[in-house]
Image (tube, helix red, strand yellow):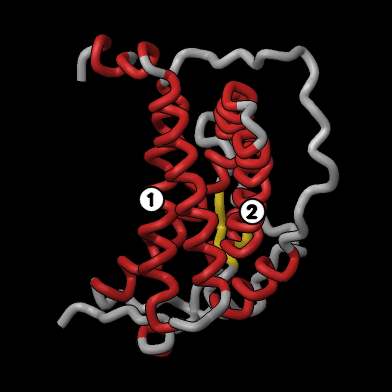
Amino acid sequence: MSDATLHAITRDPDDFAVQISDQIESFIVAVTEIAKGDEPDSAVPFLLLEVSQLLLAGGRLGAHEDIVPDERYEPDLGPEADVDDLRESLARLLDPIDVYSEVFDPYEPRKAPVACRISDDLADVLTDLRHGLAHYREGRTTEALWWWQFSYFSNWGSTASASLRALQSLVAHVRLNQPLEDLNGLDTDEDLMEDALAEEAGKVMAEEIAGPLGLRPAT
């Protein structure tokens, strides 16, 4: 892709804003629907798809030149919408494969993995995205784009990327018929070092979660 093509969006920022906002709103609606649990057999594949599509929007924001808000101080949006119900619904839906291990910064050497939850990740991402969407719906397009770009770099980009790796790994284990080992009590409250994570991560057999989560192992 040439530089001219990559930055062509700067010639028509309104179209860019519409495209980004549509992708973000689509993700929010889709994850909210998945969390209701009406189609548990498709939950993991659908989440994999939705997070992948969201990160395309994030990549476009990351490749865009720095967006500067119109005002020095961010207008007050009032209290943030509560995402606890969505977080808890996702946790129930994804049990027992909600917890996974992650290294936050691959460029910081000797950092031990930490335990994370897909449900926490997605709820946090939705909080960031909804914040920008509130600006967008109030007509503050530049403010919305600035927030989405800033929070992509500072939070939701890395958070969504981590959950994507977990979801992709889960689907790959099942489709390639590579059983996972039992999680054996792994939780985000534990301060686990790398060896402990390597020993404890896993023991939920893929065949036990494949049916309920809608995943089909390779034959």
* Residue sitting at x 44%, y 34%: 18
- Of the pair 55 and 143, the residue shown nearer to us: 143
> What quarter of the picture does the C terminus occupy?
bottom left
**In the picture shown, does residue 10 fall above or below 120?**
above
**x and y percent of residue 140 in the render?**
64, 27
**In the picture shown, does residue 186 fall above or below 120?**
below
* Residue sitting at x 49%, y 83%: 38
| Residue type indicated by callout 1 | Ser
Give the secondary structure at mark 1: helix
**Residue 181: in sight, yes or no?**
yes
**x and y percent of residue 119 in the render?**
61, 64
In this rendering, position of residue 16 left or right of residue 79: left
Q: Name the residue carrying label 2.
A: 114
* Residue sitting at x 45%, y 36%: 20
Q: Residues within 10 Å of mark 2 (few under 14, many from 20)?
A: some
Q: How far apart are labels 1 and 2 at the CA level? A: 22 Å
**Residue 109: in sight, yes or no?**
no
**x and y percent of residue 179 in the render?**
36, 78
- Of the pair 79 and 62, the residue shown nearer to us: 79
- Of the pair 189 and 79, the residue shown nearer to us: 79
In this rendering, position of residue 71 left or right of residue 4: right
